[in-house]
Amino acid sequence: MLSSYEILRLLLPEFLIEHFDITAISNIDDVLHISFEEKNSTPQEFKERTLNSKGFLPEITVEDFPLRGKPVKLHIRRRRWLDMESQETLQRDWNLIAKGTRMTQDFAGFLKKISRY
């Protein structure tokens, strides 16, 4: 039997499940809204620096594959990090949105493929 984590990996983009916590799930006007916050773990690309989490960037909302016939909107909050030595503000480089859309890259690719038929 699959665990809850394994089921989520089948339904949602894998990078979200690995690097973000789900903070809320709601069904508003027959649209499924899932909110995520980036986990408070030092990014691998900045391991050699001393970082402190300093809040979040503005939330972005993207569309993903429908689930059970309902549109899905993912609300994503990414962390900001402060380098304690240089006082530089850093963030991970996430490619969350397909260029020119408000959809996840996977969903945009899927729509592009089916529009060819």
Image: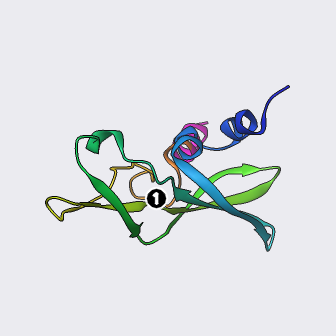
Q: Is residue 116 visible?
A: no
Question: How would you classify the magenta stretch by its main secondary structure?
Answer: helix
- Which residue occupies the foreground of this view, 117 or 7? 7
Residue hosting label 1: 101
Q: Residue at x 47, y 54 (%)?
A: 40
> Secondary structure beneath disc 1?
loop
- Which residue occupies the foreground of this view, 89 or 14? 89
Residue 11 among those drawn in magenta: no
Question: Is residue 32 found left or right of 51 in the rendered image?
Answer: right
- Residue 107: x percent and y percent? 57, 46
Question: Is residue 39 found left or right of 68 in the rendered image?
Answer: left
Residue sticking out furthest to the left: 86
In the picture, residue 14 is in which quadrant? top right
What span is colored magenta in the figure? 107-117
Q: Residue at x 44, y 60 (%)?
A: 78
- Image quadrant for the C terminus? top right
Q: Is residue 1 above or below residue 22?
A: above
Q: Residue at x 18, y 65 (%)?
A: 87
Residue type, numbered disc 1 = Thr
Residue sticking out furthest to the top: 1
- Residue 56: x percent and y percent? 43, 68
- Image quadrant for the N terminus? top right
Residue 116 among those drawn in magenta: yes
Task: Identify the image's colour scheme: rainbow, by chain, secondary structure or one colour.
Answer: rainbow
- Residue 4: x percent and y percent? 77, 39
